[in-house]
Amino acid sequence: MNCSIKHSPPSFSCSNPLPKRGSSLISSKIQSLPLKPFNFNIFKRGSNSITLQKPLYFSHIQDFGGSIGKRNHEVVCNAYEADHKQQPLEIKMEEMGQSEAGQKMKIGLYFATWWSLNVVFNIYNKKVLNAFPFPWLTSTLSLAAGSLIMLVSWATRMVEAPKTDAEFWKALFPVALAHTIGHVAATISMSKVAVSFTHIIKSGEPAFSVFVSRFFLGETFPLGVYLSLLPIIGGCALSALTELNFNMTGFMGAMVSNLAFVFRNIFSKKGMKGKSVSGMNYYACLSILSLLILTPFTIAMEGPQMWEAGWQTALTQIGPNFIWWVVAQSVFYHLYNQVSYMSLDQISPLTFSVGNTMKRISVIVASIIIFRTPIQPVNALGAAIAILGTFIYSQRFKIRQETSK
């Protein structure tokens, strides 16, 4: 908002320039540029007026207006050379709310992109696993695609390569190991059961987090946190008992994935503290190291002969589209994880946790619609209870963090 006020006299005066002591008004800061010598009489004891022999102009005022809430106000004044011509008094006002709105829009864009990429990945991942039931190779291809994308980005200087040392990779190794186990276990789960069921079980990750923190790290939690786990555990149990196509391997894969990702988060917090690597580059390094860990196990568990036979069968049944499915699931896996790690640079862990909960809702709903997964009302109720419990846990955990400060 810009406005202009004409002011011609060679002197400037005003009354009550500042609130009296004890006033409820928010105080202002007045700054002035160095001026040529002139009579300057301001804020004498017992006086509440300003008299200047040279006129002033306001260069800008921040947070001007009757907005509600606690704000910081700043008025910057500069002197004009006095003459008898009219000179403009220009006031520029910039609302801090604009930057806040821009930040919220940026976070919203991160979330929308994260959820969309995750939905697309899960759809193509399930399509690939239905036609090509080799979860170890599928998991490896996902990590390989991400590693290749980032290596090319670094080589072409599209992204600045991180500055790492031996200590960084040493600290990253347990994180990568846990990430590898969690990634493979989740893929095995989705190869055996519906995508929706895998994500319902994976919504129980907070329960594993509290369990590991309590019994392995010795952390204690208030009663509210423990109570918030009841709907999570109860909802997951209800969904498992009423799942029409229940498979124990698929169920255990999701459970192992939960446990592995909890340890990944713990190792990441402890080992990577103080390491100045951006979210994008951090996940890139994590993918590369996980790929190196996973590749020999993938060859040992499945092997080229099984892959060749399965690949030919998939091409015969699906056609050339199968190749696109494999590429899509590999690329979108990297992209959605990259965006999620980038968003961690912009938001708090609590906001990220809530966003992760909403992400699971979008994946569950989208997969049920696209794959026409049969679901009973009781099963849907269990999913809703588990997801609601995850949200409640996030809120209780926030209260626990605030009270512990």
Image (cartoon, rainbow, N blue to C red):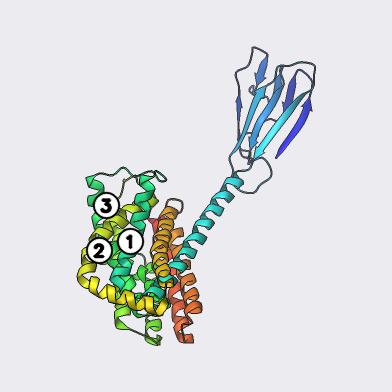
x, y percent for residue 366: 50, 74
Query: In the image shown, does 372 or 345 lie closer to the viewer?
Result: 372
Q: Pointer 2: what residue?
A: 294
Quarter where residue 360 is shown? bottom left
Q: Pointer 1: what residue?
A: 143
Quadrant into which the N terminus falls = top right
Q: Which is in the foreground here, disc 3 or disc 2?
A: 2
Q: Pointer 3: what residue?
A: 271
Q: Residue at x 28, y 44 (%)?
A: 164
Q: Amino acid at mark 1?
A: Leu
Q: Amino acid at mark 2?
A: Leu
Q: Residue at x 46, y 71 (%)?
A: 363
Q: Residue at x 33, y 71 (%)?
A: 186
x, y percent for residue 333: 39, 63
Quarter where residue 234 is shown? bottom left
Q: Residue at x 44, y 81 (%)?
A: 382
Query: In the image shown, does 49 or 364 lie closer to the viewer?
Result: 364
Mark sitting earlier along the chain (3/2): 3
Cα distance in 3D space between marks 1 and 2: 9 Å
Quarter where residue 132 is shown? bottom left
